[in-house]
Image (cartoon, rainbow, N blue to C red):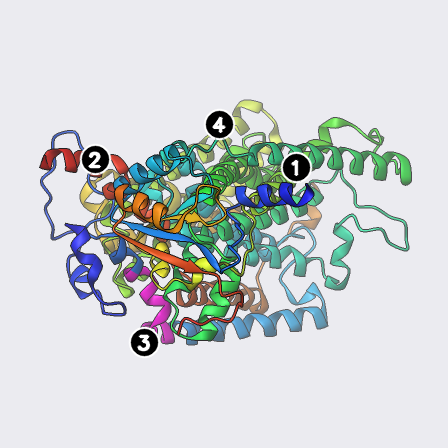
Amino acid sequence: MPWSLQDRPKGEKPSDCEVASSTDKTVTLPAGADPPLVTGNLGFHDITQLVSYHTEKRPPSAWYMAIAVSSTLLCVLLIMIAYLVWNGIGVWGNNNPVGWGWPIVNFVFWVGIGHAGTLISAILFLFRQKWRTAINRSAEAMTLFAVICALLFPTIHVGRIWVIYWTLPIPNQMEMWPQFKSPLLWDVFAVSVYFIVSLIFWYVGLIPDLATLRDRARTALRRRVTGFFALGWTGANRHWRNYEKTYLLLAALATPLVLSVHSVVSFDFAISIIPGWHTTIFPPYFVAGAIFSGFAMVMTLLILARKIYGIQNIITMDHLEKMAIIILLTGTMVGFAYITEFFIAWYSQVEYEQYAFLNRATGPYAWAYWTMMSCNLLFPQFFWIKRLRRSIPFLFITSIVVNIGMWFERFVITVISLHRDFLPSSWDYFNPTIVDVLTLIGSFGLFLTLFLVFLRYLPMVAIAEVKMVLPESDPHYHHKHESEEH
Amino acid sequence: MLKKIIRQIKATMGVYESRTDGVYGLLAEFSNPGTLIDGARKVHAAGYRHFDTHTPFPIHGMDRAMGLGQSKVGYITLIGGLSGLGLATWLQWWTSAVDYPINISGKPFFAIEPSIPIMFELTVLLSALFAVGGMFLLNGLPRPYNPLFYSRAFTRASDDAFFLHIAASDKNFDLEETESMLLEAGAKVVEVVHDHGYSELHRA
């Protein structure tokens, strides 16, 4: 019985629950019952202990190695930004027909990654997918950090970043206002609102867990800091009542929001008249691609985190398999969209469209196009095989391959469509510079540093929510057991 | 009169006044969600109103057991959403058609179609801010000082323990009587919580 585990003294290492991993345990279930979401027969206190413990002890040595690498990359990013601001955007490979080079590719790439978190927390919440509780916290954190990386690129791409506030409707001495008919301005609103709402959603989810950390704190400083952010939460039912309603409302608000963000990003392309951009398929196709790449990034990070932190009983093989199925689904949707684009180019009989797509597959950038096709459409098809969906090395490799493929997708859309202008005399080939490359690598440093700091100081699994999916959390569970005793 | 209304509003947030002798209330621990929900039902039936349960996670059916109605956060969120929609419409119309109209490729100065993305975004933004702000307001958060924090056992309310607290401000409250009632309702342990009146963190 999980109740008997309650009396273990605090601070003791939960070795008994770390040993039992999800794979070596065969549970006999009644026919038709779902497998348990949390394995290893953990009780409420075990979950508190297993998750909070990692924010309290010294991090594992792998964490130190990782943060050494990521903060070095972060420094590279900062140096590149300083170099860029000092010299202007001529330091990048952007040329005359290709006015949007890597910075916009990177922007769309990072915004896309930043979709999985809110999808998991909002849409799966509305669909009552209880398995989300194990992964939503880290996925939401990943979303926030990816959106920070995304916001960085258009900001530095404007060249004169000291006037970036012109994109906001702030009264100024020129008496000018932003141009609200421009999709670029919609983008400013869409991505910033997405960031703010995701941050709120994440913080609201964190409040009960911060209270848990506060109540476990052994030093005054720790109690003060966690206590400040926990806002005096006591788990009162009068509070839970409003809290749960708010969480539901935020999920309902974030659901159309998450679908809208990448739609608005796709308007940047779709509303222009460039062949290859001017298509109505862009919004749904961008959203599917965003979910695809976002889940791949969640998978990359969680495979490492669950192993290093020994939380395989909370983030189980079943969770990874469910994510693999979503990757398969969205990857196939994206691949279908690639093929539809070709069909429509032929069917429309518009010669510019036809040229743009033939040039994609056979022109000077064919290597990029086929990289994208094989990584995004073909590679995830291996997930039809159950054995591969449950193989950690294969999942890890695929999650990285998918993100390489999705970066190339944005490269294909942005650069290939631009490098053939309507005027053949301005046709050119795009070559990135070393600054382009180091800025992209550096943005991973920013992302990973933020994520590692999150793993160190905040509960990476939503403690209160995982407790809710245990059968013991239901009052009827106890009523039933009591009546059996009588 | 006004003081009474404020006291009533505070009671809905779970903020109660302690007695003049410093007694804040009785804190009863129950062994599991099942016994807690039965206990809450009995406490409510016994006529107590200034009470609350404290649990590590929300327990389904507790609102009904405690006799609480629907949360009002939804109305506040609706107000936020409508103000966001109104703000976005006004902002786009006033800036581009009234304050500084600029002819951009012969398009109308203001039209609904290109205004929809911003209208949507600000509706969502203000709804979310109002939802969370409204939740804090209705819950009386942030609340840095709470006499319940003086109880040592109460630290487990965010871990694996299930508490029911009856405030001394309840009109039916009586130290002995309420305690025996709680034990009868299935409480494992009952503890008197004193309000020491200072916010110094005394838990070492």
Label 1 crowding class (10 Å Cα cut-off): few <14, some 14-19, many 20+? many
Q: Which mark is residue A61?
A: 3
Label 2 crowding class (10 Å Cα cut-off): few <14, some 14-19, many 20+? some
Residue named by callout 4: A343
Q: Are marks 3 and 1 on the same chain?
A: no
- Residue A138, picture quadrant: bottom left
- Distance (Cα) linking label 4 and label 3: 52 Å
Question: Against A383, is A83 above or below?
Answer: below
Disc 4 marks a residue whose amino acid type is: Phe
A61 in magenta: yes
Disc 2 marks a residue whose amino acid type is: His
Mark 4 or mark 3: whose residue is earlier in sequence: 3
Where residue B158 appears, as percent x and y from the top left, is 37, 55
Q: Are marks 4 and 3 on the same chain?
A: yes
Q: Are marks 2 and 4 on the same chain?
A: yes
Residue named by callout 2: A479
Disc 1 marks a residue whose amino acid type is: Gly
The secondary element bearing badge 2 is classed as: helix
Question: Against A261, is A57 above or below?
Answer: below
Observer-side mark, 3 or 1, equals 1
The secondary element bearing badge 4 is classed as: helix
Q: Which mark is residue B162?
A: none
| Circles 3 and 1: CB atoms closer than 8 Å | no
Left or right? Give the position of A75 relative to B46. right
Q: Nearer the viewer, residue B4 or B93?
A: B4
The secondary element bearing badge 1 is classed as: helix
The secondary element bearing badge 3 is classed as: helix
Q: Are marks 2 and 1 on the same chain?
A: no
